[in-house]
Image (tube, helix red, strand yellow):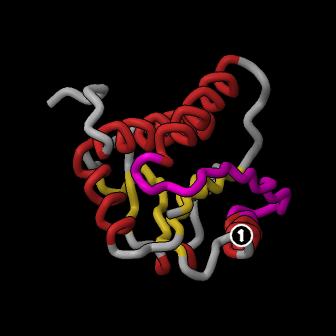
């Protein structure tokens, strides 16, 4: 199964970019042992439209153009469902074992995610009710993907 993280906005150089790269590398290396073919992060350019509705629409079009046809779509949103790490790992395993070709995680722009994408999502995840900077959401997602991979491989990284 292929994992794809679509993130609106650029990750600037610095400590956040280094940490994101570290977790991306860990997921890539450990994921092969549990049936993850690849993981890739694609940055989507932020819209420069004047109004929020137009920005969301333009970003949604750019995101939709990158989503593979066979993908399960997962949105990251503060109003989504908060899954524990074990439940997150079980969800990935269920999709992998069910023959899901790709899973796409979307981190929307500052104005949120357009309704057209929300309608396509299998699940919407939250890292809590707080508003997080997009760079930190990317890091937290990559860390949770790494944690899920270690849970699925039986590694003691995660403690119950």
Q: Residue at x 59, y 70 (%)?
A: 114
| Residue placed most toward the observer, 51 or 143 | 143
92 magenta-colored: no
Q: Please indicate whether residue 92 sits to the left or right of residue 136 in the image.
A: left
Q: Residue furthest left?
A: 160
Q: Is residue 13 visible?
A: yes
Q: Is residue 132 visible?
A: no
Q: Residue at x 82, y 61 (%)?
A: 50
Q: Please indicate whether residue 22 sits to the left or right of residue 86 in the image.
A: right
Mark 1 residue element? loop
Q: Residue at x 33, y 68 (%)?
A: 97
Pointer 1: what residue? 66
Q: Residue furthest front?
A: 33
Query: Picture coordinates of residue 36 (x, y %)?
Result: 49, 55
45 magenta-colored: yes
Q: Is residue 26 above or below residue 98?
A: above
Quadrant housing the C terminus: top left
Q: Is residue 92 above or below residue 126?
A: below
| Residue placed most toward the observer, 97 or 43 | 97
Q: Please indicate whether residue 20 sits to the left or right of residue 140 in the image.
A: right
Crowdedness of circle 1 by 10 Å Cα count: few (<14), some, many (20+)? few
Q: Residue at x 53, y 74 (%)?
A: 71
Looking at the image, how many numbered discs can be counted on the residues? 1
Residue 92 position by quadrant:
bottom left
Query: Picture coordinates of residue 38 (x, y %)?
Result: 59, 53
Query: Picture coordinates of residue 78 (x, y %)?
Result: 42, 49
Q: Is residue 59 above or below residue 137?
A: below
- The part of the chain drawn in magenta is 33-55
Q: Please indicate whether residue 71 sits to the left or right of residue 81 in the image.
A: right
Q: Residue furthest top?
A: 15
Query: Picture coordinates of residue 57 (x, y %)?
Result: 70, 72
């Amino acid at each position: 199964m292929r994992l794809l993280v679509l993130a609106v906005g650029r990750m600037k150089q610095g400590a956040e970019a280094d940490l994101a790269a570290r977790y991306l590398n860990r997921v890539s290396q450990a994921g092969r042992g549990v049936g993850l073919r690849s993981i890739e992060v694609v940055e989507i350019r932020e819209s420069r439209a004047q109004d929020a509705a137009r920005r969301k629409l333009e970003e949604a079009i750019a995101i939709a153009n990158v989503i593979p046809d066979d993908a399960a779509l997962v949105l990251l949103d503060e109003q989504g469902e908060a899954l524990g790490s074990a439940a997150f790992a079980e969800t990935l395993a269920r999709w992998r074992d069910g023959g899901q070709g790709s899973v796409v995680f979307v981190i929307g722009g500052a104005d949120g995610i357009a309704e057209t994408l929300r309608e396509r999502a299998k699940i919407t995840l939250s890292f809590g009710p707080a508003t997080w900077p997009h760079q930190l959401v990317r890091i937290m997602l990559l860390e949770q993907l790494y944690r899920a991979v270690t849970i699925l491989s039986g590694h003691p990284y995660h403690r119950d």
